[in-house]
Structure formats: structure tokens, C-alpha cells
Image: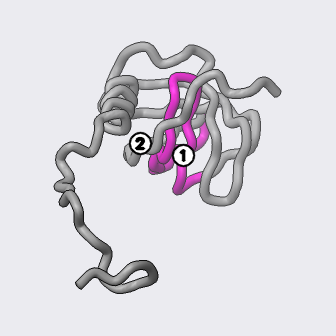
Amino acid sequence: MQPRSRHRITVDIPVVVTTVLDSMDGTIVDLSEGGAQVAGCGLPVRSQCQIDYEGHVVFGTVQWSEEDRMGIRFPYELADGPLFDRLEIARAARLTPTALQPRTLGARPAGGFGRRFG
């Protein structure tokens, strides 16, 4: 097995996973251009499936599977479409500094070890 060439990004994307015989609701919990981890459903390893999201379909093959989650590899890397857009948004949010969170300079933790301040 080859090492991952892309970093997986944590997401929360509701999708429908469809096979020839069945259709199941699931949630993509991590995503990269090359694949996704889907929670809430499972298929046998090597199953072919498609992920439906906002009217767009991405094909994939199950690489590993547990009772309620599985890893799906895409035969073609995501390069456009709604899933790719969500990946880019999640990646940008992850890289954005936490400038929106207020910081108090010189703030001291309440209690605990260390020097006492008068």
C-alpha cells in the first residue's frame, strides 16, 4: 500500500452512498482529493459505490470497512464539484489563524501551581 499523498481534512458532510443493490445515508468525516472516510454505514471491502452530494456523483472503491464506517478511494482525484468546494472551504478554515478568538495579553490562569501574584 502506498502512503497517502494528500492530507485528510476533518469535515461533516451528509451524503448518500449508493451501490447496485442499496442506497444508504452516511456522513463524510474526513476528506482529501483521493478519498473519504464515511461514517454511519459500511460496505464490504472492494465494493464499488458512488457518493451523492448536492446532485453531484463521485465514484469510489471501499478500501477498508468496519461495522459503521469505511474508507473509500476515488479513482480520479477531486478537482471540482461540491465535494471539492467543501474540501477547499474546510482546508482554508483550518489554515486561518484564530484571529477571531480574543486574546488577553498578560492574563494569568486562575489558581494552580507557580508564582503567586499579589
Q: Is residue 82 above or below residue 65?
A: above
**Which residue is located at x 47 percent, y 50 percent?**
26
Where residue 52 appears, x then y in whole percent? 42, 33
Mark toward the start of the polypeptide (1 vs 2): 2
Q: Is residue 35 in the magenta section?
A: yes
- Horizontally, is 62 left or right of 90 in the view? right
Viewport quadrant of the C terminus: bottom left
Mark 1 surroundings: few (<14), some (14-19) or many (≥20) residues within 10 A: many
Residue 45 sits in which quadrant?
top right
Q: Which residues are magenta?
A: 20-41
Dot 1 and dot 2 residues touching (CB under 8 Å): yes
Query: In terms of depth relative to the viewer, which is nearer, 114 or 61?
Result: 114
Q: Is residue 2 magenta?
A: no
Q: Disc number at residue 15?
A: 2
**In the image, what residue occupies the spot 28% across and 72% down?**
108
Q: Which residue is mark 1?
A: 38
Q: Which percent across, then down, holds residue 29?
A: 48, 47
Query: Magenta residues: mostly which secondary structure?
Result: strand
